[in-house]
Structures are given as structure tokens and as C-alpha cells.
Image (cartoon, coloured by chain):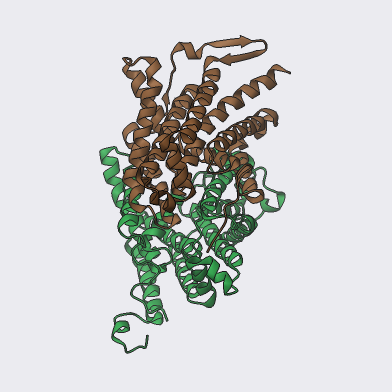
Chain colours: A brown, B green
Amino acid sequence: MSGYLLQQIVNGLTLGSLYALVAIGFSLIYGVVRLVNFAHGDLMMIGAFLTLALVAGGEVAWAIVPLIVMAGGFVAGGAIERLAFKSIRGAPMITGFIVTLSASVAIQNLGLMILGDQPRNFLFPSVFRERLEIGPVSLGVIDLAIPAATLLLVAAVVAFVQRTRLGIAMRAVSENPLAARLMGISLDRAVLVAFGLGGALAAVAGLFWGGKFGQIDPLMGFVPGLKAFVATIIGGVGSVGGAALGGYILGFAEVAFVGFMPAEYAGYRDAFVFGLLILILLVRPQGLFGREEEQRA
Amino acid sequence: MTAGSPASSRRLSQLQALVLLAVLLAGGVALLEAFGSGYHRTLAALTLINVMLAVSLTMTNGFTGLFSLGHPAFMTLGAYVAIAFTYPAGRKSFAMPDLPAFFSGIEWPLPAGALIGAIAAAAAARIVGISVLRLKVHYLAVATLGLIIIVETLALNLDGLTRGGRGLTGIPRSAELWLIALCTLLVIVGCWRLKHASVGRAMLAVRENEMAARCFGIDAVRLKVTAFVLGAGIAGFCGALLPHVVAVMTPNSFGLMLAFNLVAMVVVGGQGSILGAVFAALAFSLGTEGLRPVEESLGLYGLTQVVVAVVLILVLIWRPKGLFGLDEPLVETR
């Protein structure tokens, strides 16, 4: 295998990990409230800036920064749910959409107001920026750390959803909210945990994003968030494993498009991703691995 | 309602309302042309274009219950197509070298160019719509957001037609205020007629309960395509007018934030209410313009948009149907 190909595989793995982390949140939230949370991508931005603030202080040990960022993401995700979505639960779907879109616009513009529109440089400690030469491939330590951490997190979330009481409660709500409530499951808690967990994963994705690309700004979350939603659709909305897989498929597809098409097409990568979205929605709206939902009167 | 009943006596008849609207628009244009400054005329033009956009989106989204965010995509398309026809012929080879030779000699007046822009946008909506409109609500929202990004990406990269990120400048300021006012009148009246004709009623039936409507033999998909295509056509037309007001066009002139603001106007007015959309668009345009000095003096850029978003969330929590719901205030509807 040529070095170039290996390099592209590493790139796809990194980008795919970022999409996977955000896509899982979309999937969890959609599962419990049947809502696409447009504000989800902006939690990435919050996570990135939280990291920057922690690192700029310089007093927090690096090992615990991701933990604090995830806790912050959990709180932010939960806060969005409590402030904006809780009062409209049960409203028509379109209302839900408009509220999530409003929350997204409000977060972005609050970011602009507080942080200004200039991108900030984002530096990981030097350990992560070191490059390893493995044969013909030059790897940043970060390129290995991101997929490794992602796999760990995905495994943890899957275990949580499959094994714990709260995870089982979330799955029950996702299957049938009414029956779940009759069984004594707290809808509020299941929804809060889904938003919080999604927020934590998105925030840590923001940390990785900053580390990988080196620059962050208040509007950085929206388009990657939409792309992660594309990944969710590819994997089939509503399953954690499917969303993660969709993230990797999209990451590889995007990297392949940029890496193997003539250079003048590289600018079209976003058009390619969303073109792919429309194509998949047409051919297989339930996603590559999802089941079709029955429509009843 | 009969003309003499007490409930309707306080409402204007449709003819009275039409005359009143025409007089208001004509009077406003005359006053602004006589006494207004350039700033006032530009503000009025942008406000009226917002009114048209909000009314057209209330037709697409409000009547049939779709949730399209794609207006800015069709506006961008309409704008670039129109500019290809109206841009000064002498400068075309410099600014748009990739334009086919056919265009190099022509320099059409704005109404013709804008109409072609509208047709192009409607045709694109027709092609996209046949497939995308079969999707469920939340997929449609994301797919149309994707459409905005696709169009923006294309416009950024097709350098020889759009000058890419540098944008096209020197577009003739040929969108006269009276022309925009006339178009506004036509759009409002046209959408009003549509809403109260059998097609419009069928659309509203689809919005209320698609499955029930289909059981009555209503072709829901066809009606959705119709609403989508008509809305996109008006959006394309407005998109064509706008650069001829401000003389500049860039690939991100019409972006995601505009999509959100248009939805905000439609929702606040009441999804499906034409006059509601008109009032909401007026309030939005003048309100944000009024907040701009505050934003600048405090240095808090983004404040206006935060206010719009918060107001929208509050409206949805406290008054989920918007100001007027599906109803039309002040005017008899039959």
C-alpha cells in the first residue's frame, strides 16, 4: 500500500471519529424525543472554547481537562433541554425544529457577542503535537489519540445504553414513551440524560476538533453538526452503533473525495457531503442500517 | 359571513383591503421618492423584499405544513441567473469570463432578468422537489439546509461566473422602489387568491391531516411540489431584486441566518397567515434596523440575532400558533 493511501486512511479515521461522536448524540436525542436537535453541533463549539479557557488558565492538569469538558458538555446539553425544549415537549414536530434552530442561532450569536468573530488559535500540549514516522506515514499523536478515545467512548455509551437501568429506561422511552411512563419510567430523566450524554460527547468532539484543526470560532459547530447529522442518517437514526458507523463512513467518504479527486474539486467537499445526503435520503431514507418506521394514522 | 353581521362589520371587504393596500404602497413610494433619503429608500426596498419572502414562505411552509429552509438557496440561484442577463455588457468578459458567448452582448432590463431568475429557481425547485418532498418533515429541513450549503459551495467555486468569494460588484441599481412595491402587491394578492381558492384549501387540508386529505383524493405530493415550486419562484425573483438594490452579490449574501430569519417571520406571524407574515416581516425588518445602532454602540455584535431567536422561542412557548394562526386579521376571508 502506498504511503499516500495510508495517510488518507488515517485522515478518514480521525474525521470519522469526530463525526461519530457528534452523530451518537443526534441519535440518542432523536431516540427519546423524535427531534433533530439543530443546536447539537454548537455544543462542539462550547466544548472547544471550554477547553481553551481551561488551558489558557494553565493550572488544570491535562489529564483531567477532557473530563471537565465532558462534564461541561453534559451540563450545557441538559441546560438547553430544560430551558428551551422541555416546555414544548409534545408540541408538533415543526415547533420542535424551530425551537432547536432558534437555540442554535442564539448560542452562535451569544458566542459572537462574548467571544468576537475572530478565530482563536488552539494548541494542544506538545506531547500530542509530536509526529511519529511509521514507515512512509507521518502521524500526529493526536491522529491516534482521537480514534482511540472515540472507540473507548463509543464502547462506554453502548454499554451504558445496553446494561444500566437508566440506559434501559432510555431505550424503553425511545420504543414507546407512553408505555414507558406507565411502567414508572421518568420521561424527564431519560430525556435529560440523552441531551446531557449527547452534549458531553459533542463537547469532547469540540476538544478534538480544536486539537486537529488548530483554530476555533463561535460559528465552527453548525456545519460540522449538520454533517454529523448526515452521518446519523447514513447509519440509521436511533441506534448508537449505527450512528458511530455512519460517522466513520462519512469521514472516509469525505476524505476520499478530497484525497482522490483532482485538486480543483477539493473546494466542493461540502457540496459533495450534502449531495450524498440527498441521494441517501432518496434511495434509502431509513439509512443504510436502519429499520423503516411504520406510519399510522 | 354576510355583509351586515356585526362580526364582519368591523372587517374590511377584500376589495376595500386591496384598494387600501395599493394606496398605502403607492403613497409610501411617492412620499419616499419626494422626501426620503437614499437610506430610507433602500430600507423600504429591503423591507418590502422581506415581506415578499415571508409571504412566499408562508405559502410553502404554512399552507402545506412543509418545513423547507431552502429559500436562500433559490434566492442565490435567481440572483446569479438574473445578473447574467442584467450585468453591464461591457464588463461581462472581465467579471464573468466563463459566461457563454450568448450572454456577452446582452444587457436586459431588470424585470426580464429577474423573471428568468425566478423561472430558473422554480425549475431547480421542481427537480429537487419531486424527490425531496417525499421525505418526512425533519429530513426535508436538513435536506433544504444542505441545499443552501450546496448552492453556496457551487457559487464560491464557480469563479468564472460569480467571481467567487470576492463577489460581483457594480451591479446596476435598477430595482426602483415602485417596481418592488408593485411586485409586493402582486405577491400578496396572488398568495391570497391561492389560499382562498380550492387549491389553497386542499393545501390546508394536507397540512392539517395528510392521510385524511389523501383519503379524499387529494394528491398531497403534487400539492407540496406546487407550493414548493411557487415559493422558490418568488424567492428566486426576490433574490434577483436584492443585488439590484445594494449593487453587490456574494455567494454568502443569502445564507443560513437568512433562512432562520424567514422562518422566524413566518412563525411569529402565524404559519399560514398572509397578513401575519406581512406584519411580522415589517416588524422584523424595522426592528432589527432599529436595534443595529444599539448593537454598534455597545459593541455587542450578534445581539439582534440573539433577540430574534429568544423572541421566537418565547412565541412558540406562549403562543405556539403565532400571532394569527391560520387566520387573516382585519379582512373578510370570503
User: Which residue lies most toward the right here?
Assistant: A1
Report which quarter residue B153 is drawn in: top right
Rendered location of residue B62, percent (x, y): 46, 63
Q: Is residue B144 visible?
A: yes
Where A84 sits versus A20, above or below? below
Rendered location of residue B205, percent (x, y): 50, 71
Where A66 sits versus B272, above or below? above
Residue at horizontal 67 percent and vertical 49 percent from the top: A283
Q: Is residue B266 left or right of residue B152?
A: left
Rendered location of residue B6, percent (x, y): 28, 85
Rendered location of residue B319, percent (x, y): 32, 60
Residue at horizontal 64 percent and vertical 33 percent from the top: A253
Residue at horizontal 52 percent and vertical 11 percent from the top: A130
Report which quarter residue B124 is drawn in: bottom right
Q: Is residue B304 visible?
A: no
Residue placed most toward the observer, A71 or A152: A152
Residue at horizontal 55 percent and vertical 23 percent from the top: A147
Report which quarter residue A60 is drawn in: top left
Q: Report how many numbered discs are placed on residues in the image.
A: 0
Q: Dividing the image into 4 quarters, which one contains the N terminus of chain A?
A: top right
